[in-house]
Amino acid sequence: MILVAGAGAGLGQSLLARFERGGFNPVGLGRTRPNKPVGHFHTLDLTDEGAVKSVITQIIAEHGPPRVVIHNTSELVIAPFKDTSLMDYRQTWASMVQSAVLLAKSTMHPMVEAGGGTFIVSGATASLRGGARFSAFASAKFALRGLTQSLAREYQPMGVHVCHAILDGIIDTQNSRDLHGLDPIKMMNPDHIAETYWQLSHQPTSTWTHELDLRPASEGF
Amino acid sequence: MILVAGAGAGLGQSLLARFERGGFNPVGLGRTRPNKPVGHFHTLDLTDEGAVKSVITQIIAEHGPPRVVIHNTSELVIAPFKDTSLMDYRQTWASMVQSAVLLAKSTMHPMVEAGGGTFIVSGATASLRGGARFSAFASAKFALRGLTQSLAREYQPMGVHVCHAILDGIIDTQNSRDLHGLDPIKMMNPDHIAETYWQLSHQPTSTWTHELDLRPASEGF
Amino acid sequence: MILVAGAGAGLGQSLLARFERGGFNPVGLGRTRPNKPVGHFHTLDLTDEGAVKSVITQIIAEHGPPRVVIHNTSELVIAPFKDTSLMDYRQTWASMVQSAVLLAKSTMHPMVEAGGGTFIVSGATASLRGGARFSAFASAKFALRGLTQSLAREYQPMGVHVCHAILDGIIDTQNSRDLHGLDPIKMMNPDHIAETYWQLSHQPTSTWTHELDLRPASEGF
Amino acid sequence: MILVAGAGAGLGQSLLARFERGGFNPVGLGRTRPNKPVGHFHTLDLTDEGAVKSVITQIIAEHGPPRVVIHNTSELVIAPFKDTSLMDYRQTWASMVQSAVLLAKSTMHPMVEAGGGTFIVSGATASLRGGARFSAFASAKFALRGLTQSLAREYQPMGVHVCHAILDGIIDTQNSRDLHGLDPIKMMNPDHIAETYWQLSHQPTSTWTHELDLRPASEGF
């Protein structure tokens, strides 16, 4: 079973599709149910401690422990510092860090007890660089990276591979085409990202990647 | 005027003393009033949006805008992930990141309008490395570093020098002597850290440091 | 065609074998000819400007331009600074950096003209951290990383994917078994590393990785 | 005594002047003797193993061991990879890395035996980022950073503070005014850099900085 948190659209659905094609039972979690979700989908607020725990407990009771868990929630705020409210900081943090904590709380030990698994977190350029006008988003993405490193150092000796993927570019979805008007060649195809996550979750224990970056060939860095 | 948030003890008091010696009007903020505070001291919860705003507004009305602002709150949690509660993540984040956001909200623009200033944030080893059992602390310290970078890129062109000091070691206070039983030679003298912060806040605009580390000569890294 | 520089043993031969299995024409370069080399093998000193140029020119004349080029030479020196001679610095630099420069000189433009390709460089823990007693090795591995980053920023817009793989652990070869006496489970299987290089060299242009790390599950970091 | 390698102009002379003002005996080394050198000046090729050893041995015999040693040589090459010759790589490496190795060889142990000292190395933006067209320069600056880290980890426990200063901007010299035509406000004043080096070399053992950056307030990063 693969569990994707933040599966309402774009990359989340591509991940579920890729792993389903590879024989996994796909289970998506998110605030908004897609029109035609791949596999199972549970609508929930990923920052709600009680809901996350009860929904994932029920999923595991039904499908067994996950082999792969992917954290893929994002909440972008771009604004000058003076126009970024405390609520913006709280919400970006909750939607990216609190949700990852809750996801890990409900899945790490089931994976350990089942003999191992993979836990992948989606980062961004802002995981490494706090740019002007990105104070809320970068702060939360930095926090998520620190959390992920700590989980890796704690759980890898117990058999769970923990990985931080830095997505350095814009993901090609209908939404980002409408929003950015970028040439698709300058965006990341979500199916291609999903292929990398598939590879990461199949690395043998002799060669685990903790961190990698992904960007379009045309993206400066 | 120098404003130190997290001035209830140790480094906070050393900072106020160093800047007072240099002719600054020292104002400390913190949860717990020291027995004999250096200069002025305001007891408040630095995570309380309303309190921070009203107290700092009143301080500025009385003393004028700060020339130097130092963020020095810390809340250490060391525990395995499974024993770290969501409340631990919220509290470490609030005590270190939310307090920094609120401090900056109340001081950055007064400094900009007054023609410039310095804003220094105290980081830690965990700002750069998420170790096992440090998931809450490292996550919050990473977040604080991302926030600080973003503030630097946004406010330096407006004349406010923003600096992130990585304190890689244990600060020599009575509390840490009781707690760690370390040879004082292996700890950082808070007066020496204060001297560095003094130097940072007096760098000419031609040579601003954004990030430096400080550690005892005997500390491995 | 795949060209591997530093193919005399271990990982180099595993790489050639993996790509041969995938339909590539394997060509190895190195100082010492293996007993039973995979595919073609050319014995040469990879730091010899004239030899590298003439051998690779001849290989390209015969087989066409490479699709994948891998730089995999290493020369480990571990010694206190006072026992590390200037010759040690020169040799580690030449064997790792000069050889990479010469390899890139002979292959980048043929790949650009052929419409693209992949250039992968093998780094190490010491690419990111200069440890005590590793001054020569770390200095050269840092240099190689700087070179690789620069090549990526220059050649990726021309269609050549440039990648730096940080091998954070000991590669499981007969040689390292004899030398370190480590449990094989604590070493990296060269066939598994080769699989990752295979994946990197097949990433679509929408998602190129510039840097990743690889380490055994049991390796601390 | 302070020994500055790369003291023929600009920052080197400013450093000698700052330390002379602070009571140090200033000794400069470099290829080109300035018109009116501050203190003593020895003309030599800093990449010449024999010359460096004999000149510094003689300086120490005359003046005693240095308290502060600064490595400040630089050799900038900016060119596309295809126009950067192997000789460019060798020369940038020799002028920046080989010279630092030779300088450290002749001064570290005299400082250790004299009870301690400070060894500061001047880095650049390219110490952290390998930009397009900077392959030779970045590769050498990365190498120098790796070397410096290793020296820090080896010699700090023996009492020598080793520091890497990242100069992220253009130093304001007559030469750079002629070359770049930049507004001086956008350049780093060498006297201000010298002040920071003075502060670094006087940090007490409880708070040593290994790495810091310096840039003009107006410099993006």
Image: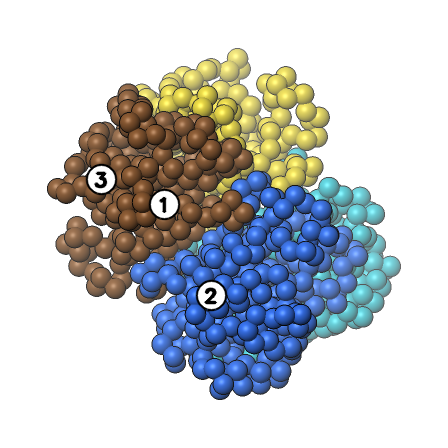
Chain colours: A cyan, B blue, C yellow, D brown
Nearest-to-viewer mark from 1 and 2:
2
The Cα–Cα distance between marks 1 and 3, rounded to whole angstroms, is 25 Å
Q: Amino acid at mark 3?
A: Gly
Mark 1 or 3, nearer chain start: 3
In the image as oriented, which residue stretches furthest toward the right?
Answer: A61
Q: Is residue A121 visible?
A: no
x and y, in percent, of residue D150 in the image: 48, 35
Q: Position of residue C178 (x, y in %)?
A: 63, 17
Q: Chain of mark 2?
A: B
Do the numbered discs 1 and 2 sit on residues whose CB atoms are within 8 Å? Answer: no
Query: Looking at the image, is B67 positioned above or below residue C23?
Result: below
Residue A113: percent from left, percent from top: 83, 47
Mark linked to residue C5: none
Residue in view at x 17 percent, y 59 percent: D181
B58 on left or right of A68: left
Tags 3 and 2 touching, CB below 8 Å: no
Distance Cα–Cα, label 3 vs label 2: 35 Å
Q: Amino acid at mark 2?
A: Arg
Instruction: Residue B21: give its label.
Output: 2
Chain of residue at mark 3: D
User: Which of labels 3 and 2 is toward the front?
Assistant: 2
In the structure shown, which secondary structural element does the residue marked by tag 1 occupy? strand
How many C-alpha atoms fall within 10 Å of the one at disc 3: few (<14), some, or many (≥20)? Answer: some
Residue type at the position of mark 1: Gly
Measuring from the top left, give residue D22's x and y in whole percent. 32, 48
Judging by the rendered image, the residue that carries numbered circle 1 is D123
Q: Are marks 1 and 2 on the same chain?
A: no
Distance Cα–Cα, label 1 vs label 2: 34 Å
Q: Which residue is mark 3?
A: D39
Give me the residue at 43% from left, 51% from top: D212
Q: Is residue A25 left or right of residue B8?
A: right
